[in-house]
Structure formats: C-alpha cells, structure tokens
Amino acid sequence: DGGITQSPKYLFRKEGQNVTLSCEQNLNHDAMYWYRQDPGQGLRLIYYSQIVNDFQKGDIAEGYSVSREKKESFPLTVTSAQKNPTAFYLCASTTMKGAFFGQGTRLTVV
Amino acid sequence: GESVGLHLPTLSVQEGDNSIINCAYSNSASDYFIWYKQESGKGPQFIIDIRSNMDKRQGQRVTVLLNKTVKHLSLQIAATQPGDSAVYFCAEAGTFAGGTSYGKLTFGQGTILTVHP
C-alpha cells in the first residue's frame, strides 16, 4: 500500500544524545516535511524539502538537522542542542490536496 | 508573525446533531485552507480543503465555509457520529517560489470535538 511510514513509533532519548527519526514514503511525492506537535498545540514546521538534495528551515529548526539523499526518505535528527525535544513528531509529503501525514513518532527525553 | 487560530477549544455535541467548528486566520494573502482531523496518538487526516476563490465547499457530511471579509473559516459536520470525536485543526498553506506550498502549513491550536451517544 502507498503511504508514509514513520519509525519508531516511540523513542526514548537520554539527555545529550542525538537521535534520528525515520520517514519513508512510496507515494512518489517530491516534497516532504517535518512537524513538531506539543500537547494541546497545533503543528509547527521544523524543516522541509521540495526536492532531493535540497531542504529549508521551517519555523523551529534550531536543534534539528535533516538530509534528503533519496526522494523516498527524509530523516530528522534531533540533536543535543535541542533543549526541549520531548514531543510528537510528524512527517508529511504533499500533493495539491495538501500535506498527508505519517502516524508520528513520540520522542521522550529520559 | 502570521497565525491561524480557533475560537473554541472544545465542543461537545450529541450524536446526530450538526457540529460547527470555527477558525480565524490573519494572513489575508492566504489562498488555500485545509481542515484536518487528528485522533489520539495519530497523524492528522485530511478532511476537506478550500481555495480563496470559493466561499463554500462540500464533501461527504462535511462543509467548509470561507468568509474572506472577516478572515474566518468554519467546518460543518452533519449528523455527527461518535467516530467524529477527535481534535480538528484548520491550516493555512504558505507560499514557495511564488506559488502555494501545500505542505508548508500554519496550524491553529485545534478544537476538541466530543460526540456523546
């Protein structure tokens, strides 16, 4: 089935560690996005990529990094510079019907 | 900066009633809006969209109304069912290279819809 797959569903990180969240899509979409969602809040844009080997910062890029080496994949690294990383992370890819989302990764700092 | 916000954070209705969820936006240049439904622990699910050259758009049991004069969106759900219980977000699409960027979205806070049997 076509879709957007995020893994893992739950992730625990120790303070000072970098972690990488996976996002894969087989929809042949050019553009992919990473959002962060805090409890009781809407989504905020972290990074996005309109095409392979290119990406732009969103509204809250500090403490995060991405790569886009393949069209299907857009991994997000949460670095130790991100002071409050505990959140629900959502990956999306787009058509002219807007963004279609994966099921999310819940990251918790322990 | 620009923002999209919601008037009512919670809405409780009885099964079978119609629901109306409201949203205010501040960027008058926006030309594309989307409503999403998000169930607990899941990603947002596309419900319906509307462009700024339209006032109304209907889907299956859902209608979106756009009032550009007062920068207001609403989502109407007919014959609300318990399965409609979720958080509903409106989102505004940004621009990229002079065109609409369908994934560069600004989201509102969300409205929690609870449907009682």
Image (cartoon, coloured by chain):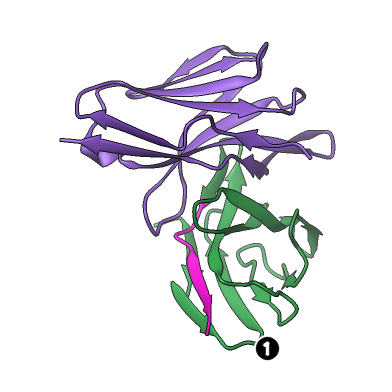
Chain colours: A green, B purple
Q: Residue at x 30, y 21 (%)?
A: B18
The foreground one among B39 and A68 is B39
Q: Residues within 10 Å of mark 1 (few under 14, many from 20)?
A: few
Q: Residue A77, relative to residue B107: is it above or below?
A: below
Q: Is residue B40 magenta?
A: no
Residue holding disc 1: A16
Furthest toward the left, the residue is B117
Left or right: where A21 falls relative to A58: left
The foreground one among A9 and A29 is A9
Residue A27 image position (x, y, % from top left): 53, 53
Residue B32 image position (x, y, % from top left): 65, 28
* Secondary structure predominantly adopted by residues drawn in magenta: strand
Residue A50 image position (x, y, % from top left): 74, 52
Q: Residue B82, relative to residue A80: is it above or below?
A: above
- Residue A21 figure quarter: bottom right
- State which quarter of the image contains the N terminus of chain B: top right
Furthest toward the right, the residue is B97
The residue segment tinted magenta is A101-110
Q: Residue at x 65, y 66 (%)?
A: A74
Q: Exactly how many numbered labels are in the figure?
A: 1
**Tag 1, which chain?**
A
Q: Amino acid type of disc 1?
A: Gly
Q: Find numbered disc 1 in the image and state the secondary structure of the residue it sits on.
A: loop
Q: Residue at x 57, y 17 (%)?
A: B66
- State which quarter of the image contains the C terminus of chain B: top left
Left or right: where B11 falls relative to B29: left
- Residue B26 figure quarter: top right
Residue B34 image position (x, y, % from top left): 55, 33
Q: Residue at x 79, y 65 (%)?
A: A53
The foreground one among A70 and B101 is B101
